[in-house]
Amino acid sequence: MHPQPHEPPVEIRLTEAETIALAYRRAARGDAWAALVQAIEDALSDLAEAERRSLRRDRLVSRGYVRANLPGTVS
């Protein structure tokens, strides 16, 4: 089995990052720039979602302390 020109030889084991990069490049039909842009867009989207969830969790925790009327909290 011969590798494609834009793929590593079969006997080379890829790191997780390389495997992901190769998947993006394949999805972009070999266009490295499009693959990079898509990977960055996906990463930024995931980061924004993680931040949204973190803020939501923090609000829920804060409301929980107020509702429980724990000592040291404002009611």
Image: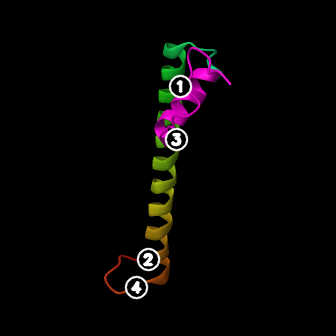
- Reading the image, the residue beneath label 1 is 8
The three-letter code of the residue at mark 3 reads Asp
> Viewed as shown, does residue 69 lie left or right of 73?
right
Nearer the observer, 38 or 23: 23
Q: Secondary structure at mark 2?
A: helix
Where 16 sits versus 71, above or below? Answer: above
- Left or right, 19 with respect to 55, comes to right
Q: Are marks 4 and 2 in contact (CB under 8 Å)?
A: yes
Q: Which circle, 3 or 2, is nearer the viewer?
A: 3
Mark 4 to mark 2: distance in Å? Answer: 6 Å
Of the numbered discs 3 and 2, the one sitting upstream in the chain is 3
Residue 21 point in image, percent of width and height: 51, 29
Pointer 1 or 3: first along the chain: 1
Depth-wise, is mark 2 or mark 1 nearer the camera? Answer: 1
Please say whether residue 68 is one of the residues in the magenta stretch.
Answer: no
Q: Where is the N terminus found, in terms of image quarters?
A: top right
Q: Is residue 28 above or below residue 16?
A: above
Please name the residue that numbered disc 2 is placed on. 65
| N-terminal-most mark, 4 or 1 | 1
Q: Is residue 24 magenta?
A: yes
SS class of the residue under badge 4?
Answer: loop
Residue 24: assigned label: none
Q: Residues within 10 Å of mark 1 (few under 14, many from 20)?
A: some
Asked which secondary structure carries label 3, the reply is helix
Looking at the picture, how far across and down is residue 72, in whole percent? 31, 82
Toward the bottom, the furthest residue is 71
State if disc 2 and disc 3 touch (CB < 8 Å). Answer: no
User: Which residues lie in the magenta part?
Assistant: 1-26
